[in-house]
Amino acid sequence: MNAPAPASAPSTSDSPRTDRLSARDRSVITLLLVSAFVVILNETILSVALPRIMADLRIPASTAQWLTTAFMLTMAVVIPVTGFLLQRLSTRAVFTTAMTLFAVGTAVCAIAPSFVPLLMGRIVQASGTAIMMPLLMTTVMQLVPPSRRGQVMGNISIVISVAPAVGPTISGLVLAVAPWRFVFVLVLPIAIAALLLGVRRIQNVGEHTEAGVDLLSVVLSGIGFGTLVYGLSGLGGTHGAGDGAAATDPAATTYALLGVGVATLALFAVRQLRLQREDRALLDLRTFTSRNFTLSVALMVLMMGAMFGMIVLLPIYLQTVLGMATLDVGLMLLPGGLLMGLAGPVVGRLYDRLGPRPLLVPGILAVAGGMLVLSTASTSTPEWHMLAGHLLISVGLACVFTPLFTNALGSLRPQLVSHGSAIVGTVQQVAGAAGTAVMVAIMSARAVAVQGAGGTAAAGVAAGTGRAFLICALLALGAAVVALFVTRSPEEADAAHGAHG
């Protein structure tokens, strides 16, 4: 049974829709955007600091990598539950929960005396981060009229692209003048300020239900997505390589984890299909009855995989083969992230006018072209050449993500939007892990072959990098064909026709 929002915050579903956002709605969206930027920035801000943490806490790389892996695993486990949370709890309650978890986790990390408290802090941080993006997307779909969704989703792309891109750069700048704990000290006051302001300003939007949570679904989701993402990260060779870890067969462990993950997710899907008949599903799979949603999610998997794979693989090449310093690599990759963010609002406005297809097809072709540029990597490739490829990919991704997010969620019935947001967030985590794993695995296999034939380690990494980006380019060309079948949702098409004549 649906219960209306409190009288002090009328449900937008009962309010007349116009093409102009109210001051209250703009305030809510702006605050959510700022908060989401802060929490997502934290996802990549620690990467450059890991060597300092290893030295300070006297831990090996196989232990330190858990600070990143545990964050990713927590995101994969928590995000599927957010669809239920967004239907069950008010907007203010979900926001307060997310930012409180993030602020507490950040404080624990800043004062952690040893590895275990630091790891616990990262897990608490990730729990808050996992809730924030689905909350932001669902709120936007509830508040923003169809004719302006692309423009607002374009602002969200700033959060998605710029925050991860500037994380390593900010971390490098902080580490140049202060200890690694200041990476967290810098973020903490911003998180607390956002929390306090949100408690005062965030208004409840939409409606919520009183349905209970299916604990078996939560368990199946956690085991399934957790083991799948961890197995994929192992496929990419990130599970404690190079520290003289116990002599186990990493390939056997990885494939066992992947098998458990796939089998458990199959059980999870069967459970959801049964529960959704009574509107009690943790993650409602009726979202996939929308062809546009399904196609958009499939393209999102490919594009997210390509982006995260590039984020991991390109720095390895730049440092190992071209000998660039860590901070220089971060500064070199920064323009691409900024370009994606700055292009987001422009792409959003174009989406409102043109729909998804005129942006998706050229954007994906640009990604394919940039991947082809990077596939020519060698031991003597100029840095500007790799920068050009990265910028071309960034332009392409800017044209892709806003249409995909907007069209996917805009194609769903209102009661399925929160579940669609949770699915999109989960897809980002799984696709990121898969893209990283596959590209690193391709690079490693080719590098081993080159070195086995008498080549140098640098030549092997260069050849492997080229091979991985070439395969990505071919997949992107296939994705461009799929994009031809993506259409605009009828609601947004009617709104665009009315707005633009």
Image: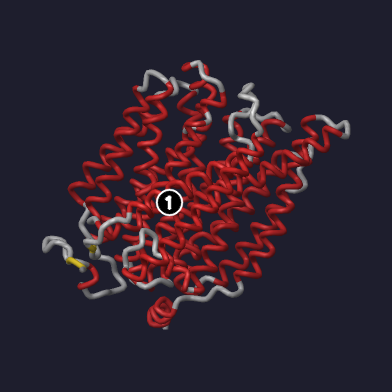
Horizontal side of 140 relative to 385 (left or right) equals: left
Determine the residue positioned at 64% across, 48% down. 390
Is 399 drawn above or below residue 197 in the view shown? Answer: below
* Colour pattern: secondary structure
Residue 34, how many percent across, how many down? 34, 47
Q: In this orientation, which residue lies closer to the viewer: 324 or 6?
A: 6
Determine the residue positioned at 56% across, 57% down. 301
Q: Is residue 23 visible?
A: no
Horizontal side of 315 relative to 400 (left or right) equals: right
The quarter of the image holding the N terminus is bottom left
Label 1 element class: helix
Query: What's under tag 1, amino acid-wise?
Result: Leu
Residue 234, how many percent across, how many down? 60, 39
Q: In this orientation, which residue lies closer to the viewer: 217 or 36?
A: 217
Q: Is residue 437 visible?
A: yes
Residue under label 1, please give it: 220
Is 104 drawn above or below residue 182 in the view shown? Answer: below
**Which image quadrant is residue 501 in?**
bottom left
Horizontal side of 430 relative to 279 (left or right) equals: right
Q: In this orientation, which residue lies closer to the viewer: 27 or 489?
A: 489
